[in-house]
Image (cartoon, rainbow, N blue to C red):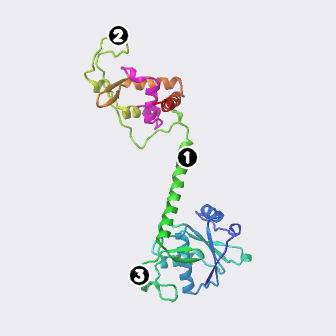
Protein backbone atom coordinates (compact mmCIF):
# COMPACT_ATOMS: atom_id res chain seq x y z
CA UNK A 1 0.00 0.00 0.00
CA UNK A 2 1.32 3.46 -0.91
CA UNK A 3 0.20 6.93 0.13
CA UNK A 4 0.27 10.27 -1.61
CA UNK A 5 -1.30 13.63 -0.75
CA UNK A 6 -4.25 14.54 -2.94
CA UNK A 7 -7.68 16.09 -2.76
CA UNK A 8 -10.97 14.27 -3.08
CA UNK A 9 -13.63 16.28 -4.91
CA UNK A 10 -16.63 16.41 -2.55
CA UNK A 11 -19.17 16.48 -5.36
CA UNK A 12 -17.88 13.15 -6.70
CA UNK A 13 -18.79 11.34 -3.47
CA UNK A 14 -22.13 9.64 -2.98
CA UNK A 15 -22.62 8.82 0.71
CA UNK A 16 -24.64 5.75 1.49
CA UNK A 17 -28.10 6.40 2.91
CA UNK A 18 -27.99 6.30 6.71
CA UNK A 19 -28.55 8.27 9.92
CA UNK A 20 -25.36 10.30 9.48
CA UNK A 21 -25.81 11.26 5.82
CA UNK A 22 -26.24 14.98 6.48
CA UNK A 23 -23.26 15.09 8.82
CA UNK A 24 -21.05 13.25 6.33
CA UNK A 25 -22.13 15.54 3.51
CA UNK A 26 -21.27 18.58 5.63
CA UNK A 27 -17.82 17.19 6.36
CA UNK A 28 -17.30 16.40 2.70
CA UNK A 29 -18.14 19.98 1.77
CA UNK A 30 -15.70 21.38 4.31
CA UNK A 31 -12.55 22.72 2.73
CA UNK A 32 -10.61 22.15 5.98
CA UNK A 33 -10.97 18.35 5.83
CA UNK A 34 -7.74 16.47 5.17
CA UNK A 35 -7.60 14.06 2.23
CA UNK A 36 -5.02 11.45 1.28
CA UNK A 37 -4.91 8.92 -1.55
CA UNK A 38 -3.95 5.28 -1.06
CA UNK A 39 -2.66 3.35 -4.07
CA UNK A 40 -2.13 -0.39 -4.51
CA UNK A 41 -4.39 -1.38 -1.62
CA UNK A 42 -4.80 -5.16 -1.34
CA UNK A 43 -7.87 -6.44 0.53
CA UNK A 44 -6.08 -9.72 1.21
CA UNK A 45 -2.98 -8.12 2.74
CA UNK A 46 -3.03 -7.84 6.51
CA UNK A 47 -0.18 -5.34 6.29
CA UNK A 48 -2.27 -3.05 4.03
CA UNK A 49 -5.20 -3.28 6.43
CA UNK A 50 -2.89 -2.45 9.34
CA UNK A 51 -1.51 0.61 7.55
CA UNK A 52 -5.02 1.73 6.58
CA UNK A 53 -6.15 1.48 10.21
CA UNK A 54 -3.14 3.56 11.26
CA UNK A 55 -4.09 6.27 8.72
CA UNK A 56 -7.68 6.25 9.98
CA UNK A 57 -6.45 6.70 13.57
CA UNK A 58 -4.23 9.60 12.49
CA UNK A 59 -7.08 11.25 10.57
CA UNK A 60 -9.51 10.90 13.48
CA UNK A 61 -7.00 12.33 15.97
CA UNK A 62 -6.21 15.21 13.60
CA UNK A 63 -9.78 16.43 13.21
CA UNK A 64 -11.16 14.03 10.60
CA UNK A 65 -10.72 13.74 6.85
CA UNK A 66 -11.05 11.39 3.88
CA UNK A 67 -8.98 8.55 2.50
CA UNK A 68 -9.47 7.54 -1.14
CA UNK A 69 -8.64 3.96 -2.16
CA UNK A 70 -7.95 2.42 -5.56
CA UNK A 71 -9.78 -0.74 -4.42
CA UNK A 72 -13.30 -1.20 -3.14
CA UNK A 73 -13.81 -2.13 0.51
CA UNK A 74 -16.86 -3.18 2.48
CA UNK A 75 -17.84 -1.10 5.50
CA UNK A 76 -18.41 -4.31 7.47
CA UNK A 77 -14.77 -5.37 6.86
CA UNK A 78 -13.60 -1.88 7.82
CA UNK A 79 -15.44 -1.96 11.14
CA UNK A 80 -14.17 -5.45 11.85
CA UNK A 81 -10.58 -4.27 11.45
CA UNK A 82 -11.31 -1.22 13.60
CA UNK A 83 -12.24 -3.57 16.43
CA UNK A 84 -8.96 -5.35 15.95
CA UNK A 85 -6.58 -2.41 15.71
CA UNK A 86 -8.12 0.27 17.93
CA UNK A 87 -8.35 0.39 21.70
CA UNK A 88 -11.54 2.52 21.75
CA UNK A 89 -15.15 2.38 20.54
CA UNK A 90 -14.59 5.05 17.85
CA UNK A 91 -16.87 4.18 14.91
CA UNK A 92 -17.36 7.47 13.03
CA UNK A 93 -16.02 5.89 9.82
CA UNK A 94 -18.08 5.41 6.65
CA UNK A 95 -17.34 4.01 3.19
CA UNK A 96 -18.51 6.25 0.34
CA UNK A 97 -18.71 5.36 -3.33
CA UNK A 98 -16.54 7.43 -5.66
CA UNK A 99 -16.28 8.22 -9.33
CA UNK A 100 -13.99 5.55 -10.82
CA UNK A 101 -12.86 7.99 -13.52
CA UNK A 102 -10.95 9.87 -10.81
CA UNK A 103 -8.93 6.76 -10.01
CA UNK A 104 -10.69 6.01 -6.72
CA UNK A 105 -12.88 2.98 -6.15
CA UNK A 106 -13.96 4.00 -2.63
CA UNK A 107 -13.54 6.85 -0.20
CA UNK A 108 -13.38 6.38 3.58
CA UNK A 109 -14.88 9.32 5.45
CA UNK A 110 -13.34 9.68 8.94
CA UNK A 111 -14.99 11.91 11.53
CA UNK A 112 -13.18 13.75 14.33
CA UNK A 113 -12.49 11.76 17.48
CA UNK A 114 -14.04 13.00 20.70
CA UNK A 115 -11.19 11.45 22.68
CA UNK A 116 -7.72 10.49 21.35
CA UNK A 117 -7.85 7.11 19.62
CA UNK A 118 -5.00 4.68 20.24
CA UNK A 119 -3.57 2.33 17.62
CA UNK A 120 -3.24 -0.94 19.51
CA UNK A 121 -1.17 -2.90 16.96
CA UNK A 122 2.50 -3.01 17.89
CA UNK A 123 5.24 -1.94 15.51
CA UNK A 124 5.03 -0.44 12.02
CA UNK A 125 2.82 -3.03 10.29
CA UNK A 126 5.89 -4.63 8.83
CA UNK A 127 4.79 -8.17 9.67
CA UNK A 128 1.60 -10.17 9.56
CA UNK A 129 1.77 -10.86 13.31
CA UNK A 130 -1.70 -11.17 14.71
CA UNK A 131 -2.55 -8.29 17.03
CA UNK A 132 -4.02 -10.78 19.51
CA UNK A 133 -0.42 -11.69 20.42
CA UNK A 134 0.34 -8.07 21.33
CA UNK A 135 -1.52 -7.96 24.66
CA UNK A 136 0.18 -5.66 27.20
CA UNK A 137 1.67 -3.39 24.55
CA UNK A 138 0.72 0.26 25.08
CA UNK A 139 -1.29 1.79 22.20
CA UNK A 140 0.28 4.47 20.02
CA UNK A 141 -1.58 7.72 19.25
CA UNK A 142 -0.95 8.66 15.62
CA UNK A 143 -1.50 12.12 14.10
CA UNK A 144 -1.11 13.58 10.63
CA UNK A 145 2.15 15.50 10.19
CA UNK A 146 1.95 16.94 6.70
CA UNK A 147 1.88 13.94 4.35
CA UNK A 148 2.82 11.40 7.02
CA UNK A 149 1.08 9.70 9.94
CA UNK A 150 3.41 9.71 12.94
CA UNK A 151 3.17 9.15 16.70
CA UNK A 152 1.72 12.18 18.45
CA UNK A 153 3.63 14.77 20.42
CA UNK A 154 2.63 17.13 23.21
CA UNK A 155 1.75 19.73 20.57
CA UNK A 156 -0.57 17.23 18.85
CA UNK A 157 -2.39 16.52 22.11
CA UNK A 158 -2.72 20.24 22.79
CA UNK A 159 -4.14 20.83 19.30
CA UNK A 160 -6.59 17.94 19.85
CA UNK A 161 -7.90 19.50 23.07
CA UNK A 162 -8.18 22.92 21.39
CA UNK A 163 -10.28 21.41 18.57
CA UNK A 164 -12.50 19.73 21.16
CA UNK A 165 -12.99 23.05 22.98
CA UNK A 166 -13.81 24.86 19.72
CA UNK A 167 -16.53 22.31 18.93
CA UNK A 168 -17.95 22.70 22.46
CA UNK A 169 -17.93 26.50 22.15
CA UNK A 170 -19.78 26.33 18.84
CA UNK A 171 -22.47 24.12 20.42
CA UNK A 172 -22.79 26.49 23.39
CA UNK A 173 -23.04 29.56 21.15
CA UNK A 174 -25.72 27.91 19.00
CA UNK A 175 -27.73 27.14 22.12
CA UNK A 176 -27.27 30.67 23.49
CA UNK A 177 -28.37 32.23 20.19
CA UNK A 178 -31.42 29.97 20.13
CA UNK A 179 -32.41 31.12 23.63
CA UNK A 180 -31.81 34.81 22.82
CA UNK A 181 -34.10 34.57 19.80
CA UNK A 182 -37.00 33.59 22.05
CA UNK A 183 -39.40 36.46 22.94
CA UNK A 184 -39.24 37.80 26.47
CA UNK A 185 -42.97 37.34 27.03
CA UNK A 186 -45.15 34.36 26.28
CA UNK A 187 -48.89 34.08 25.96
CA UNK A 188 -50.02 32.87 29.37
CA UNK A 189 -53.02 31.08 27.87
CA UNK A 190 -50.83 29.22 25.37
CA UNK A 191 -48.06 28.41 27.83
CA UNK A 192 -47.70 24.65 28.40
CA UNK A 193 -48.92 23.47 31.74
CA UNK A 194 -46.49 21.45 33.78
CA UNK A 195 -47.89 18.07 34.67
CA UNK A 196 -44.77 16.02 35.45
CA UNK A 197 -43.56 18.09 38.40
CA UNK A 198 -46.06 18.98 41.07
CA UNK A 199 -45.85 22.68 41.96
CA UNK A 200 -44.95 23.69 45.47
CA UNK A 201 -48.05 24.71 47.34
CA UNK A 202 -47.67 27.91 49.36
CA UNK A 203 -50.05 27.97 52.24
CA UNK A 204 -52.11 31.14 52.43
CA UNK A 205 -52.66 32.41 55.92
CA UNK A 206 -55.13 34.89 57.35
CA UNK A 207 -53.43 38.24 57.93
CA UNK A 208 -53.49 40.12 61.20
CA UNK A 209 -56.61 42.26 61.66
CA UNK A 210 -54.78 45.49 60.86
CA UNK A 211 -54.89 47.66 57.78
CA UNK A 212 -51.60 48.59 56.11
CA UNK A 213 -51.71 51.91 54.29
CA UNK A 214 -49.19 54.14 52.54
CA UNK A 215 -50.44 57.35 54.24
CA UNK A 216 -47.37 59.02 55.84
CA UNK A 217 -49.65 60.75 58.37
CA UNK A 218 -51.02 57.49 59.74
CA UNK A 219 -49.58 56.37 63.09
CA UNK A 220 -46.56 54.13 62.67
CA UNK A 221 -46.91 50.51 63.70
CA UNK A 222 -44.09 47.99 63.65
CA UNK A 223 -45.41 44.63 62.34
CA UNK A 224 -45.25 42.07 65.10
CA UNK A 225 -45.77 38.97 62.95
CA UNK A 226 -43.74 39.60 59.79
CA UNK A 227 -43.82 35.95 58.71
CA UNK A 228 -47.63 36.06 58.52
CA UNK A 229 -48.00 39.53 57.04
CA UNK A 230 -45.16 39.14 54.52
CA UNK A 231 -44.74 35.38 54.07
CA UNK A 232 -42.84 35.43 50.74
CA UNK A 233 -39.25 35.97 49.80
CA UNK A 234 -38.42 36.97 46.24
CA UNK A 235 -38.18 33.36 45.02
CA UNK A 236 -41.56 32.57 46.62
CA UNK A 237 -43.16 35.55 44.88
CA UNK A 238 -41.59 34.48 41.58
CA UNK A 239 -42.92 30.94 42.01
CA UNK A 240 -46.41 32.26 42.76
CA UNK A 241 -46.42 34.49 39.67
CA UNK A 242 -45.18 31.72 37.38
CA UNK A 243 -47.78 29.36 38.82
CA UNK A 244 -50.53 31.81 37.95
CA UNK A 245 -49.07 32.36 34.46
CA UNK A 246 -49.01 28.62 33.84
CA UNK A 247 -45.28 28.04 33.36
CA UNK A 248 -41.76 29.30 33.88
CA UNK A 249 -42.35 32.66 32.20
CA UNK A 250 -40.70 35.18 34.53
CA UNK A 251 -37.23 35.41 36.07
CA UNK A 252 -35.92 37.12 39.19
CA UNK A 253 -34.93 40.10 37.05
CA UNK A 254 -38.59 40.61 36.05
CA UNK A 255 -39.53 40.89 39.75
CA UNK A 256 -36.68 43.31 40.42
CA UNK A 257 -37.53 45.45 37.37
CA UNK A 258 -41.20 45.72 38.40
CA UNK A 259 -40.22 46.56 41.98
CA UNK A 260 -37.80 49.32 40.96
CA UNK A 261 -39.86 50.80 38.11
CA UNK A 262 -43.12 50.96 40.06
CA UNK A 263 -41.57 51.91 43.41
CA UNK A 264 -42.95 48.93 45.29
CA UNK A 265 -40.43 49.51 48.10
CA UNK A 266 -42.54 52.57 48.99
CA UNK A 267 -45.66 50.42 49.38
CA UNK A 268 -45.75 49.03 52.93
CA UNK A 269 -48.75 46.93 52.00
CA UNK A 270 -46.58 45.14 49.42
CA UNK A 271 -42.98 45.09 50.66
CA UNK A 272 -41.35 45.01 54.07
CA UNK A 273 -37.57 45.36 54.36
CA UNK A 274 -36.48 43.18 57.25
CA UNK A 275 -33.03 44.28 58.52
CA UNK A 276 -30.51 41.55 58.01
CA UNK A 277 -32.97 39.33 56.12
CA UNK A 278 -33.78 41.32 52.97
CA UNK A 279 -37.17 42.11 51.48
CA UNK A 280 -40.34 40.19 52.25
CA UNK A 281 -43.51 40.35 50.15
CA UNK A 282 -47.18 40.13 50.98
CA UNK A 283 -49.70 38.14 48.87
CA UNK A 284 -51.27 41.47 47.90
CA UNK A 285 -48.30 42.32 45.66
CA UNK A 286 -48.91 39.19 43.55
CA UNK A 287 -52.57 40.18 43.12
CA UNK A 288 -51.53 43.71 42.09
CA UNK A 289 -48.93 42.50 39.58
CA UNK A 290 -51.35 40.03 37.98
CA UNK A 291 -53.99 42.76 37.76
CA UNK A 292 -51.51 45.04 35.94
CA UNK A 293 -50.57 42.24 33.58
CA UNK A 294 -54.24 41.53 32.89
CA UNK A 295 -54.75 45.15 31.82
CA UNK A 296 -51.49 45.38 29.82
CA UNK A 297 -49.91 42.20 28.35
CA UNK A 298 -46.70 44.22 27.82
CA UNK A 299 -46.48 45.05 31.54
CA UNK A 300 -43.35 42.97 32.25
CA UNK A 301 -41.67 43.89 28.97
CA UNK A 302 -42.16 47.62 29.66
CA UNK A 303 -40.82 47.25 33.20
CA UNK A 304 -37.68 45.52 31.92
CA UNK A 305 -37.10 48.16 29.24
CA UNK A 306 -37.56 51.04 31.70
CA UNK A 307 -35.26 49.40 34.25
CA UNK A 308 -32.53 48.88 31.67
CA UNK A 309 -32.73 52.55 30.65
CA UNK A 310 -32.45 53.58 34.30
CA UNK A 311 -29.37 51.38 34.76
CA UNK A 312 -27.77 52.92 31.66
CA UNK A 313 -28.28 56.42 33.04
CA UNK A 314 -26.75 55.39 36.34
CA UNK A 315 -23.63 54.11 34.59
CA UNK A 316 -23.26 57.35 32.59
CA UNK A 317 -23.70 59.53 35.67
CA UNK A 318 -20.27 60.94 36.76
CA UNK A 319 -19.08 59.84 40.12
Q: Position of residue 196 (x, y in %)?
A: 42, 44
Residue 208 in sight from this viewpoint: yes
Q: Position of residue 279 (x, y in %)?
A: 34, 29
Q: Nearer the viewer, mark 1 or mark 2?
A: 2
Q: Residue drawn 53% across and 36% down? A: 184
Q: Position of residue 262 (x, y in %)?
A: 46, 23
Dot placed on the residue nearer the N-terminal end, 1 or 3: 3
Q: Which mark is residue 7?
A: none
**Cα distance between the residues tagged 3 and 2:** 89 Å
State which region is magenta.
240-269
Dot placed on the residue nearer the N-terminal end, 1 or 2: 1
Q: Is residue 52 above or below residue 61?
A: below
Residue 304 in sight from this viewpoint: no
Q: Nearer the viewer, mark 3 or mark 2?
A: 2
Mark 1 falls on what kind of element? helix
51 within the magenta span: no
Left or right relative to 189: residue 282? left
State the residue position of label 1.
Answer: 178
**Cα distance between the residues tagged 1 and 3:** 47 Å
Amino acid sequence: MALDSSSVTPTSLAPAIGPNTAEIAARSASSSSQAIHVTRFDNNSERDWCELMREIVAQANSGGGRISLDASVEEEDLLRHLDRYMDSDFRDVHVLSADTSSGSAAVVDVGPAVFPVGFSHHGTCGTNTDSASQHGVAPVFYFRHGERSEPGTTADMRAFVERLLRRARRRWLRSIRRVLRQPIMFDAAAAPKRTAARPIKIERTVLQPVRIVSDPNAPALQPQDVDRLYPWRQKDLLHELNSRLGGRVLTTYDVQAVRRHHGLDERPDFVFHLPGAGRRYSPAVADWIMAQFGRDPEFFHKARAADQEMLKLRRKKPR
